[in-house]
Image (cartoon, rainbow, N blue to C red):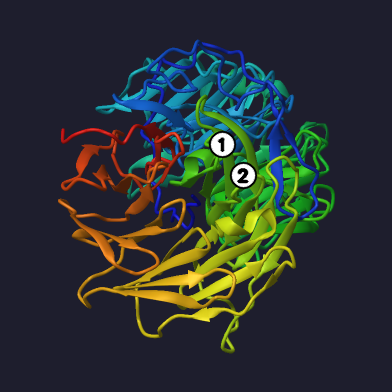
Amino acid sequence: MAVAGLCALGACTVPPVAPPGAGPTAPELAAPVVVAAGSGRPQLLLRVPGGSSGRPACERKPGLDAWCDPLPPGVLGRLGTQRFPEAALQRVAAAPDGRFYASADHDHVVVWDAASGLPLYAVAVGGSAGLAFTDDGARIAAAESDELSVVETATGKILVHDERRDERWTGGPALDAVQWITDLAVGGAHLALGTCTRRGGEPLVVLDLDGRLVARLALGEPREDTSLDVTCADAVALAGGGALLAAGRRSLAVWQERDWRAAGEPTHRLALDFGSLRGLAFSPDGRWLAAAGSGEAVNASALAERRVGRSYGLLRGGGSGSAFAPVYSPDGTRFAVAYRDAVRVFAADTGREERRIGDIVSRSAVFAPDGRTLIAGFGHPWVLGRVDLATGARLPPFDVAQHAVPPSVSYAPDGKRLATTSHEVLRLWAPESGEPLAAFVLPPGQARLAGAAWAPDGSRLAVLDSDCGIHLLDPAATEAEARIQLAPLRGETGCAGPTGVAWAPAGGTAGTLLVMLADRTLRRVDLALRREAAPLLLDSGPSSAPVLLAGGARALVGVDHEGWLVDVATGAVTRKLRLEPGERILAVAAAREGATVALLLSDALVVADADSGAVRAWLEVPVDVWTPTLAFAPDGRSLVATSRELALRWELGGGHPTWRVLPGERSQAQSAALGPDGRLAYALDDGTVLLVDPAGGEP
């Protein structure tokens, strides 16, 4: 049986996964993946044999998933993990040795393995105000407006956690005068915070890496915000292991180490040419200082031999809006500035703009240690992406797909592999172990995956994208074999949205693919010739999205209250199944041999003979069904439907169905597939897939 066209709906953020003070206890991490060479074509990212998905090593026991997290009662397995939030991309940081990256939002810090692009763990601390690795890469400092944390990189253990509650900070007196944190910088053994404090206070705070106070500094000429009754340092930077410290709001102050340690006056002052400061960064050698701010402006100043040199003045943003968080390349020859919708890369010695990269959602970006790649958060959907600075090409993003959105699911015919689709990634899993086997990645662009179907012998996958392209995929290869583009019809500029794809079982690996479009056309693709046959136009008129499933030599198509049985070879309609006009077909299924078909309505399940159209059974649906899926059991004697939180099972010789509540924290099944072993795989709205036995009675 081929199951296809299962839709991936909206995503929900996963709840915090590691409370303050907790973290993964096993620092041993699995082998990385091998990334296929970049050719611009869709690629497979294949795991190293014997490796795993970047998860900590742990002892597998019954009732635990592949990450050794507890399974809900009655669940046999879980594909994917609930550990990682959906996004966490507002800030990004790179470890100096290049082994790790970190990303953060208001609630989470996620640490990524740089070699494999896999997430290693998430910690439930905020980092949108500041995120940085220590010089040795052993710790990560993260700041939210009301929270400061230091995390051990290898384990995720929280070493320092100060949180503002009831006008006081929980970690001790070091931050008691602070109203909120605006920025964070790390250098040597110190951590500098830009803060807003009570009027007349000292907004610049320097701590050691254990959170103990080292110094408090005023900006020298504080500018008070009378509306909020505070004094603020909006941005801060450290250089040379703490040899230089810079901070400011509407002007800029720079201290040498001897001066900031003594809480003395700034060594230098620099005027700013724009309204307010948003970010600061020193070059690696401390000779340059980049400042970003509102008014679409960036200042770059030379600090040769610790003395203030020339300033470039304004580098206008060109419509990108306010600038945030500048960062220098490791060799100091470039600096990048994140704007509201783009990252701009400048030459450090001339200030000339070298490249502009759009579609950015994070307020910071980082250079890879080799200086040739830029890492930032990209939008629509949000991914942690990589850009080749020499060409501007988007490289395969970091592996966020397994937890980003609810996937659609489909079993291989032998049941030994399961495919899930999510945005531009199709992932293959081993259902028994929960192990990810490979990931098929679309090139960057607007296309999204719209469905997938297995060949009858399991040797190929047909992957449908939202631009009506069909990718033929060999799961053992590193790239797609081909992409077949469906042509627009009736003078349209583009094809209508695809709603489903199915592999005609009689056709084999070089047979016929069927694609259903929202314009009510059934498209047939001859895979031997790799070209499209004549389309079949169904009855015209407004309708809901068609549903499609292939069985035997026929395809069953359902639209509103009508069903069509179509001969795959000729495209001719062999029989039309008509229901009452008030009915609506929600899902269709065909038994493996194709002689029996089923149509799921809002209040009934209709089982019919495919040859004569005679109704064999009209079965009651006892509950409301939404976003449903329908499948015959492998033996053809029962039918299983899922709808959000329920799985219903009908014995074809019986009457009322048995049903059970599907387990899961939110119990929202977005799509489902029935395997040849009778297990049901269904996707939750947290992006994971749970495996259950659908048999059972009313709870």
Query: Which amino acid does the dot numbered 1 rest on?
Result: Arg
Tell me how far mark 1 sits from mark 2, CA to CA: 9 Å
Query: Which amino acid does the dot numbered 2 rest on?
Result: Gly
- State which quarter of the image contains the C terminus: top left
Q: Which mark is residue 417?
A: 1
Q: Looking at this rendering, what residue extends furthest in the front direction? A: 612
Q: Looking at this rendering, what residue extends furthest in the bottom direction? A: 491
- 115 relative to 167 in the view: left or right: right
The residue under the point 49% across, 65% down is 554
- Whole-percent x, y for residue 50 in the image: 68, 20
SS at circle 2: loop
- Whole-percent x, y for residue 586 in the image: 31, 62
Q: Nearer the viewer, mark 1 or mark 2?
A: 2
| Residue 692, quarter of picture | top left
Q: Is residue 669 above or below residue 536?
A: above
- Whole-percent x, y for residue 640 in the image: 32, 46
Q: Is residue 690 visible?
A: yes
Query: Which of the two residues, 228 or 45, is positioned nearer the viewer here?
Result: 45
Crowding at dot 2, Cα within 10 Å, few <14 / some 14-19 / many 20+, comes out as: some
The residue under the point 60% across, 25% down is 54
* Mark toward the start of the polypeptide (1 vs 2): 1
Asked whether the beta carbons under mark 1 and mark 2 sit within 8 Å of each other, the answer is yes
Q: Is residue 246 visible?
A: no
- Whole-percent x, y for residue 461 in the image: 62, 50
SS at circle 1: loop
The residue under the point 59% across, 49% down is 456
Q: Which mark is residue 99?
A: none
- Would you name the residue on which mark 2 appears? 458
- 357 relative to 600 in the view: left or right: right
Query: Which of the two residues, 689 or 360, is positioned nearer the viewer here?
Result: 689
Q: Is residue 121 above or below residue 447?
A: above
